[in-house]
Image (cartoon, rainbow, N blue to C red):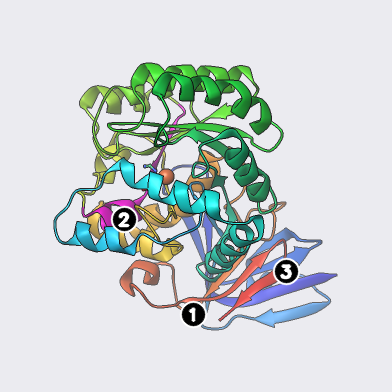
Amino acid sequence: MKTLYRDASSLVLPGEAFGQLEVIENGAFLVEDGKISWVGDTSAAPDADEQVSLAGRSVIPGFVDSHAHLIFAGDRSEEFSYRMAGQPYKSGGINTTVRDTRAATDEELRTNARELVEEFRASGITHFEIKSGYGLDTESELRSLRIAREFTEDVTFLGAHVVPSGVEREQYIAEIIGPMLAGAVEYAKWIDVFCDQGAFSLEESRAVLEAGIAAGLKPRMHSNQLGNQGGIQLGVEFGCASIDHCTHLSEDDINSLAGSNTVVTLVPGAEFSTKSKYPDAGRLVAAGITVAIATDCNPGSSFTTSMPFCIAIAVREMGLSPDEALWAATRGGARALQNEKGSLAIGADADFVVLDAPNHIHLAYRPGVQLVEQTYVAGQKVYER
Ligand code: NIG
Ligand code: FE
């Protein structure tokens, strides 16, 4: 079965270089067996079994969200309102969610995650990562990873989120790199650590990443969100696919990143929801660093499932151009997960989004408006406005 999507006002094709987009006006593409088999101008389109006109609409690749914490229970809206009144964000709030997550049934966690995934689809996200990190004992972490694995192949073990209340640090780290990790490898592809003030020190982070890599997991990090304890050098040394947050960076950090293949994943929702200063993405781009944008969806610091919202902030507050932000939310996310998603090249999975807009600039130009009209995964419609 060949389906031709035609007459798109603009068809946006991210290139391989950071921020590079090819935009075909009056564009068309053919979907065959869930993959893109032809792309070009509508006037040159091949025959198909079925034709769908997208007149007045734009098509972009589905967003790739490389950083999400969807396995949790409970609500922290009160903590958000205190922050808006001037209280600083503290990593200790994670333990509130740990308490609620442990108390929830598997079905409650699954239902919550499923609802958030539906929101992801409505926001144009077609591929996403999910972390554990709200169980923080062996049984609860493994349960979170098992449920996460029902939704995505990009599962990340984040036992090293914080030290849970009532547990001694050294004992907890031994548990992470011992029984938790031994069980986690069945479900997880990635090892993550929150290397920051109030979470894990540089040396503790090193121990966690080293053990994770030795067990066959690939490294990524939360770092430099709340301060700078040298996490960037550590992440680069370990060849992390991505270091996420990166709010506080020194010149040395920028130089290390620039000389590496590590992606910097910015999470605009976190600065928004913690009332923190936005990182300067323009500085990263000028240094030649590959930048991704992710939702960081979690109940504490960034309770959003909207990639368009994150794009709008990245453009308005972080210094990315609309083209760079679109690239960062598609190919950037894919680079951060080391996969080939976020593209509409021939042979790519037909993961795409139809926008009720003449071009992708509208994602930032019309903040807060539901422009995502349809979302497709492997050629199948998974969302319609
Ligand atoms: O990515 N920074 C660490 N972890 C999460 C926040 C977790 C929470 O506050 O519940 C984040 O922002
Ligand atoms: Fe996070």
Q: Residue at left 84%, top 76%?
A: 49
Instruction: Point out residue 345 in the picture as x, y percentages from the top left corner.
Output: 64, 53
1 vs 2, front mark: 2
Q: Nearer the viewer, residue 117 or 50?
A: 117
For badge 2, the amino acid type reads Ala
Magenta-tinted stretch: 261-275
Q: Residue furthest front?
A: 166
Q: Residue at left 47%, top 20%?
A: 171
Q: Is residue 153 above or below residue 312?
A: above
Number of numbered discs visible in the structure rendering: 3
Q: Quadrant of the C terminus?
A: bottom right
Q: Which residue was labeled with disc 2? A: 314
3 vs 1, front mark: 3
Secondary structure beneath disc 1? loop
Secondary structure beneath disc 2? helix
- Lower position in the chain sequence, tag 3 or tag 1: 1
Instruction: Point out residue 55 in the picture as x, y percentages from the top left corner.
Output: 56, 83
Check disc 1: other Cα within 10 Å, few if <14, some if 14-19, many if 20+: many
Q: Which residue was labeled with disc 3? A: 380
For badge 1, the amino acid type reads Asp
Q: Is residue 353 above or below residue 175?
A: below
Contact (CB < 8 A) between labels 3 and 1? Answer: no
For badge 3, the amino acid type reads Gln
Residue 49 shows in the view? yes
Q: Nearer the viewer, residue 101 or 68?
A: 101
